[in-house]
Amino acid sequence: MFRKILPRVWICWIFVTFASTWGIYFTGAHSCHEVKTAFQLRHIGPLRWVPETAATDADLQICKHQGPTCCTRKMEQSYDAAARRDTLQNILSYSFELKYLILGHASAYRDTFYSLLSFTLNHTLSLFDLAYEPIAREARPLVITLYSDLALYLYGDAGISIESSVHHFYDVLFPLVYRHLVNPGLRSSSWSAEGAECLRATRPDVNPFGPHPQVLAQGLAQALAGGRALARALAAGADVLNATETVGMARECGRALVRMHYCPHCRGLTLIRPCGGLCLNVMRGCLAGLAELQAPWSRYVALLEGLSAALAGGHELELALLGIRERINDAILSAQLHGPHLSAVVDKVCGPLTESVSSTRADGPPTSTLSTVKLQHPIPPASPAGGADPGGEQHGHVALTKRSLPLKPSKNDKPRSLKKLSKEFMGYIQRYKAFFSTLPELLCEGEMVVDDYTCWGGEDVVESYTDRVVGSGLLAQRHNPEMKVRGVDPVLVEAKERLEQFNQGIWHETGLGVDLHEQLDAGSGNTMETSGECDDEDGCQGSGEDEDAPGGPLPSFQPPDFRARPGMPASAAARPEAASPLLLSLPLLPLLLLSCLGRASA
């Protein structure tokens, strides 16, 4: 019986071997042509490093595989550099959108502040031109200096104090008011420098303007505090994003990226995509340092929302700037009303204010002018992209025609109102409240398998990813099965500390409200809390657990797809490539042999 079966067994074996060899010969399974094509299209390295046919390479450190491979050690090194480069480019593409949003609105706020300051400056100067003509010419530089200080304060200059600037303005205004308006007879006399200096120095004690200087200083400080804090906050956010752009990737991250993206290439699978759980583990491990910024960043975005809401809720800043004219007018009227008493006090404190020899003024009487003043930008608006602003010359000077109430902007200059601008910014920035914790999900959106039955699991082609899916943050990476995370880049640690200190300082300075602060403290961990489960939306097929699935919708933009070859249909790029005949025929040989034996025994 055995002698009758043996010839048939040999025939089946020869047939199977011949079939597999014949398929290999005609299909070119040993060829690494597809791998070389992908190597070239993605600009990974020199093509001479890619072998023509698959072979065994014992020097591989990352993509180790028992069997023929199309990879070499030099290709692994090139894959490592390419994986780091592509991932950094994807991260920068998302952070650039956020950075552009922050810097673009910072520039828009500066332009709006500048337009308000320019308009109210000319509105205040018209008070002197129309009501106090004798001091109009000499008062103009004093008013312009006051408004320049207000602009610097709004733009975040730490060396400017509203109260000091307002009181300095009234100090230098007092000699003009006393000489030309309180005692007009002294106008033709030659004043001594000591007399004018005495008036400036004693103005706080003499108090010729009553409570109006203090009321103006307090009102401006309160009204401008929100705009100043917002300008500083936008600059701080841009600094944090700049710091994240300088951070590189650790060695373990590069190896994990190669295993996820390019180890399938070594087996001829150039189009298969990684499993969702694998991608989340790799990206969360690589971005563990960035995820540590999430807690202070969510507080920072809530701070931006509070400051924007304060500007959008009313017109305090605009009304405060417009009210400068009336406050100055009330102060001058108060000095004129108490003129006799004021003169008596000044005579006792400063003594004679004129020189012994009287002489007429050489420069003649002051002339009134209704010309428009152009307020210079203390800080030029920054381009959102960090480069030159093509429209900078057009916005460098905004000339607003001076007119009486009602106030109407010129037809050629229609900046957005603070209310409209703030509401627009609030609608955009709230999408990025969980930016650093959801960044791995954004990066994996283009990598995750959607309707396919197979995906790359890190070592082989699988139906689903069965390892544990960890959450975001440094602590969660202790259980990451794909890579070891040893620490956080010192640059990110410093950026986190600066952001935390800034948040605390602004909360203290602005006093946006205890309720909002407590609400933020209670909800700041929403995006970082772990759910203990991994649902399908996180791409965790199989038994993976998502410890840290952020809530809320993600921004609706897609990362670039670097896997699709030029000219390839989208559907083809989404499908895993059919396995090479060589790789599929070897596991099927025992099944074919058993089938032949079964037929022979029958």
Image (cartoon, rainbow, N blue to C red):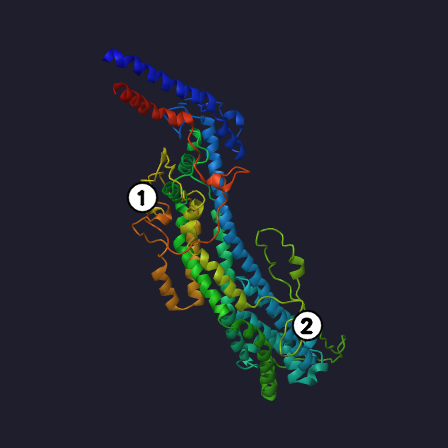
225 with respect to 137 (left or right): left
- Residue 535 in view here: yes
Q: Which of 115 and 161 is in front in this view?
A: 115
Query: What residue occupies the far top of the structure in this picture?
Result: 3
Choose top left, top right, bottom left or bottom right for residue 414.
bottom right
Closer to us: 13 or 516: 13
First along the sequence among labels 1 and 2: 2
Q: Where is residue 463 in the image (x, y as percent from the top left)?
A: 35, 38
Q: Which residue is drawn at 37% across and 48% down?
A: 538
Q: Which of marks 1 and 2 is in front?
A: 1
| Secondary structure category for the residue under label 1 | loop
Assign the N terminus to one quadrant of the image: top left
Residue 352 seen anywhere in this rendered image of the structure = no
Q: Mark 1 points at which residue?
A: 544
Question: According to the image, label 2 marks what residue?
Answer: 401
- Count of picture labels: 2
Question: Is residue 310 depicted above or below 572 in this figure?
Answer: below
Secondary element under disc 2, as helix, strand or loop, is loop
Identity of the residue furthest to the left in this view? 1
Q: Residue at x 58, y 72 (%)?
A: 168
Q: Whole-percent x and y of residue 324?
A: 58, 76
- Which picture quadrant has residue 177? bottom right
- Vertical relation: 577 (above or below) 384: above
> The C terminus lies in which quarter of the figure?
top left
Give the alpha-carbon distance from disc 1 to disc 2, as whole Å: 67 Å
Left or right: residue 540 versus residue 43 is left
Residue type beneath disc 2: Thr
Residue 132 image position (x, y, % from top left):
67, 81
Residue 163 location, x and y as percent?
52, 71
Q: What residue type is labelled 1?
A: Gly
Q: How crowded is mark 2: few (under 14 residues within 10 Å), some or many (20 or more)?
A: some
